[in-house]
Amino acid sequence: MRSQEQGRGGHFLRLAHALALGAVAATGLMGAPAFAQAWPARPISLIVPFPAGGTTDVLARAVGQELSKSLGQPVVVESRPGAGATLGADFVAKSKADGYTLLMGAVHHTIATSVYKKLPYDFQKDFAPVSTVALVPNVLVVNPPVPAKNVKDLLALAKAEPGKLTYGSNGNGTGQHLIGAQFESMGGVQILHVPQNLFAA
């Protein structure tokens, strides 16, 4: 058990160093005369483009904690949700490129380039990837009263009652939304998409 914990901690430290170095490299400050002052000299903002409490937020807080230890400066995790994660991305894209504002990106950002006609930023030009933090699987679940014990049962139920079943996602144009649409298309069924109101108190 001890060796597993040490391994996990070592992984986070390596990740923290990678994030820190990547953030500096992404700003173009490496080797610039203005870089005489050690980085970081003040707190760093890690922007999460989703509401607090979700997977991305939890991962960001774990990474932020290890980065703080490694860099000797606070890493402040800040939620800026909305518009399929594009509001937070836009905030970071318009922030000063000095290594003090980082984005906790997700698959939604690559999806957004195809879903939205026009974005206020260029995802490929305005950001530099630093590190993969986690690979998060999506799981299909149903409410216990739903008479479906497997995917075959669920498809049969959806075909018998088109448009009656619903599925939730964390917003239009997000990964969950498109997975649901793909499920409908591949299964030849109609299921109502209900984007969740993640801002409700």
Image: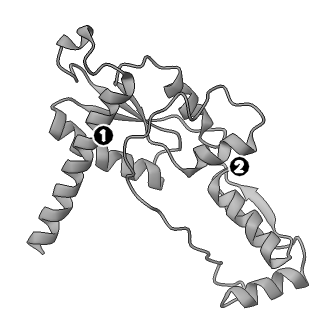
Residue 112 in percent (x, y) is at: 67, 43
Where, quadrant-wise, is the C terminus in this rendering? Answer: top right
Q: Residues within 10 Å of mark 1 (few under 14, many from 20)?
A: many
What type is the residue that disc 2 sits on?
Answer: Gly
Place residue 182 in its image quadrant. Answer: bottom right
Are the residues tagged 1 and 2 within 8 Å (C-beta)? no
Residue on which the image places disc 2: 173
Q: Secondary structure at mark 2?
A: loop
Structure colour scheme: one colour
Query: Which disc number belongs to residue 84?
Result: none
Q: Quadrant of residue 187?
A: bottom right
Pick the residue in front: 109 or 199: 109
Residue at 39 percent of width and 51 percent of height: 132
Under mark 1, the amino acid is Leu
Tag count in the figure? Answer: 2
Residue 18 location in percent, x, y?
27, 42
Quarter residue 22 falls in: top left
Between residue 32 and residue 76, name the one nearer to us: 32
Q: Which residue is mark 1?
A: 19
Q: Is residue 125 visible?
A: yes
Of marks 1 and 2, which one's residue comes earlier in the chain?
Answer: 1
Q: Point out the residue furthest to the top here.
A: 33
Q: Residue at x 70, y 58 (%)?
A: 177
Please indicate whether residue 27 sits to the left or right of residue 6 in the image: right
- Residue at (51, 67) in percent of width and height: 137
Horizontal side of residue 109 vs 52, given as left or right = right
Q: CA distance from mark 1 to mark 2?
A: 27 Å
Residue 113 placement (x, y as % from top left): 68, 40
* Tag in front: 1 or 2: 1
Question: Is residue 65 visible in this depiction of the protein?
Answer: no
